[in-house]
Amino acid sequence: MNDIIKTDILYPETDFLLRIEARREGMSAAQWAEENKAFLKAAILRHRGVILRGFDCDRNGFSATAKALEPESIDYRGGIGPRTLVAPEVYNSTELPPKHSLAQHHEMAYNAYWPMQILFFCEEPPEEGGATTLCDAHQLYRRLPRTVLDKFLSLGLKYVRNYTQDTPYRSIQETFGTTDKQWITEFCRGNGVQAEWNGERLTLTQRAPAVREHPTTGTPIFFNTLALWHYTYWSKLLGSFGGPMSSAAQGEAWQNSLYGDGTPIEDSVVADILALYEEEEISIEWKKSDILYFDNMLASHGRKPFAGRRKILAAFRSPRHASAKA
Ligand SMILES: [Fe+2]
């Protein structure tokens, strides 16, 4: 294999991220991935993620690569991020204001099902900044203060979303693909989400644990989106959207994360978690046609601020349901 690819570990001290570079022109990413599926799947368990660099790929090739590695896509309806479908089962990455960092999170960890694997594709490298960041999730779990962890372990989490006329970036229609109240209520009930209507205002509430065990490695993971959902994080971003939400009080916030019993998570706890993520995160500086393939439980992800153009596409694969047996 070594005459056609070159491999190295990006962060050898923690055995984090395997980089695989094509040594020949015109090697198809989709074909190479299909032929080396077992190797790649083992690699993301060991190194938490793999970067394929220098392969031939466009957005349809990326769609084919994702399908070759992980045949099943996820139903993103009800998800939180603003997303546009751009190729079969391929979405734009989060469309949040470029000048802000996207805090570390595990995709759809607030939900009753989530993707086990994520692939990102660099269609257009960022002009300035815009690195994707990853954190070793088990390392974060190990470094959290025991008292903080114990409280999350005993209470779990509650995630709240309020959709109003002033919802800053994602409407009910964009979240569910419909505004049919009965359909939305039933869809939510089937997915462990409580939907409450008050006229045109919709409040979604869902409970989830803060820690889950990885089904293959058995490692405990601080697996959630609490930092990204917490009102202190959002209140910094909302100024960019404008409108009355920018001054909303905590209880009225567009979205918020709470302890599972409904009590607020202390601002200082969220600040400490964000600081820990920042200390642990590593950056991926994108090159055109790069593919990042990683395990959504073993690594959290985020994004650095950027300026100018940047086009990163995403595929969310292999849904795992909370009720599944290991
Ligand atoms: Fe994400």
Image: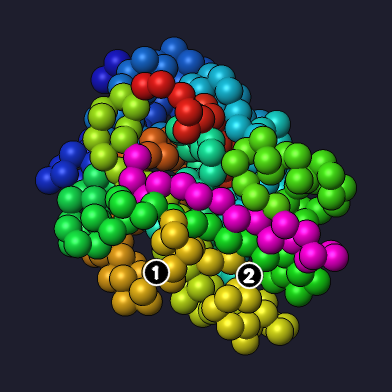
Colour convention: rainbow
Q: Which image quadrant is residue 35 in?
A: top left
Residue occupying the point 53% across, 36% down: 113
Distance in Å between CA atoms under marks 1 and 2: 16 Å
- In the foreground, 193 or 284: 193
> Can the viewer see residue 292 in this picture?
yes
The label number, if any, that marks residue 84 in the structure image: none
> Which mark is in front, 1 or 2?
1
Residue occupying the point 16% across, 44% down: 14
Give the main secondary structure of the magenta stretch.
strand
Q: How far across and how far down the image is residue 149, in percent?
A: 25, 56
Q: How far across and how far down the image is residue 184, in percent?
A: 78, 45
Q: Quadrant of the C terminus?
A: top left
Residue at mark 1: 265
SS class of the residue under badge 2? loop
Q: How far across and how far down the image is residue 107, in percent?
A: 49, 46
Q: Is residue 174 left or right of residue 218?
A: right
SS class of the residue under badge 1? loop
* Disc 2: CA contacts within 10 A as few (<14), some (14-19) or many (>=20): many
Q: Is residue 186 left or right of residue 21?
A: right
Residue occupying the point 70% across, 71% down: 168
In magenta, the rendered stretch is 196-212
> Can the viewer see residue 6 in this picture?
no
Q: Is residue 196 above or below residue 24?
A: below
Residue at mark 2: 254
- In the foreground, 130 or 174: 174
Q: Is residue 165 left or right of residue 300?
A: right
